[in-house]
Each structure stands twice: as C-alpha cells, then as structure tokens.
Image (spheres, grey):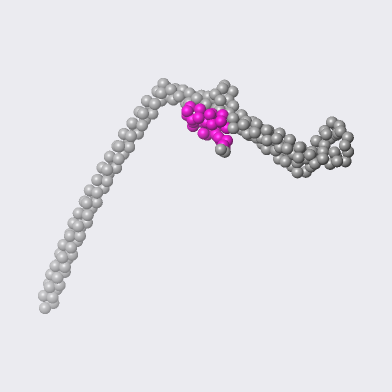
Amino acid sequence: MNETRPKIGDFELEKMTKEELISNFKNLNKYTTSLEEKEKKYLMELAKLKNIILMNHLKPKESELSSQSPEPIASNSIQTKQKACFVDPVINAVVVQLKKDLEETKKKKEELEVELNATKFTPESQLTKRLMAKCRKLLNENEELGKIISSGNVAQLEHDLAYHKQLLNETCENEQNLNSFLMEIDSQMDAMKATIIHLKEKLDEKELVINRDSDNKNEKMET
C-alpha cells in the first residue's frame, strides 16, 4: 500500500478546526511510522544483498585459489578479497543506488519530523505562533471598536447620517415641486401661444376688412 506525504500549507493550517488538525497529525504520524518501517526494510535488504553479493563473488575465487594451492588461506587474505569484491563496477553501482535510496528516505523522514514539530501545539511551534498572532490581531480590532463606541463617535456618525438623509429627502421633494412648477409654466406658455395666434388671426381679419373698405371708398370717389 503506497502512502503519500500529507502536505499542509500555512493557509490550510489557519483555516483548520481542532478535529482537522488532530486528524492531520494522526496521518503524519502514520506516515512517519511507514517511513521508519521502510528504512528498516531497506537496511535489512541492503545487508542481505551485501551478503549475497559477497558470497557469490567469493565462492568462485575460493574455488580457484583452492585448486591452485591446497594450503590454508590466511584471514588477512579473506579480508583483502572482501574489499576487492566492492571494486567490481556492478556491485559498486548496486551499493551506491542503495545508499542513495537510504539517504533519500532519511531526508524525507527529517522533513516529516520538521512538519510534525510545526503542527504540535507548543509555545515554540509555528502553528501556535500564527494562532497567537491572529488572536492578538482580533483583540486589537476589538479594542479599536470599543474605543470608537465609548468615545461616542458612533452616535455622532448616526446623527450625521440621519441629517444627510433628511437633506436628501428635502432635496428630492424640492426637485419634485420644481418639476411640477415647470410643467405648469409650460402649460401656461402653450395657452398663451394659442391666444396670441388667435389674436393675430383676428387682427389679420380686421386689417383685411379695413383695407377692403378703404378700396371701396376710393373707387366711389373716383367715379
């Protein structure tokens, strides 16, 4: 069963509840245990592989030496052979890869321990420091709000708001009255224009009658 390392950022930590933090701590603890077990398994496999490689490499060498010389082999010569077997490129590559895997496992374990220490609720943990900073910020905001309320600024603001609201209502009412007055004037102007047109028509008719009478008189005088 493959396990992935739980990743928790600063933003997630600030938003987590207590139950979520406990759950993530348990997951991190499980992941640490899994890494420790893998490390032990790698170490055991590395030891077994070293023994197998060493035995497989020494057997043909011992057979070759025993066929060449029946004399007993000294302990120092065996140690020399054991050292020589690691000079083999194939064996050396396997050992280097195993060491690399082991170093990566140890590095992951150290990173996980750092993350675990960061999630613990201790006075020196990063999580505790962030939570305390947030609490102090909230307290400061509450104090500022309390000062505003106690100083009476809120009442003054409410009074100013009511005053401006009243002015706005009066302005709207005056605008409505002005619009009504303008509409009334427009209506009166239309009536006056109609009267002027009517009077002009009457005047034109009178002038026409006068001119006609004048022409008739002139004709009679000429005859």
User: Where residue 70 sits in the image (x, y, percent)?
Assistant: 87, 37
Tell me where residue 148 appears, x and y as whole percent: 43, 24
Number of numbered tags placed on the structure image:
0
Residue shown at 44% from the left, 25% from the top: 145
Camera-nearest residue between 193 and 41: 41
Q: Is residue 95 above or below residue 222?
A: above
Q: Which stretch is magenta?
A: 3-31
- Kindly indicate the quadrant of the structure image that contains residue 210: bottom left
211 to the left or right of 117:
left
> Which one is in front, 130 or 184?
130
Q: Is residue 199 above or below residue 46?
A: below
Residue 70 included in the magenta stretch of the image: no
Q: Is residue 95 left or right of residue 22?
A: right
- Specify whether 58 is left or right of 135: right
137 or 201: nearer the eye?
Answer: 137
Write the residue at 31% across / 34% down: 166
Is the C terminus in the top left, top right, bottom left or bottom right quadrant? bottom left
Q: Could you tell me which residue is drawn at 22 percent across and 56 percent down?
A: 193
Q: Quadrant of the N terminus?
A: top right
Residue 220: in sight, yes or no?
A: yes
Residue 221 seen in the current view: no
- Quadrant location of residue 169? top left
Residue 28 magenta-highlighted: yes
Residue 106 at x, y = what percent?
A: 66, 33
Query: Which of these two is toward me, 150 or 113?
Result: 113
What kind of secondary structure does the magenta stretch mostly adopt?
A: helix
Q: Is residue 176 left or right of residue 104?
A: left
Residue 214: give x, y in percent of width and height. 14, 70
Q: Residue at x 41, y 23 (%)?
A: 149
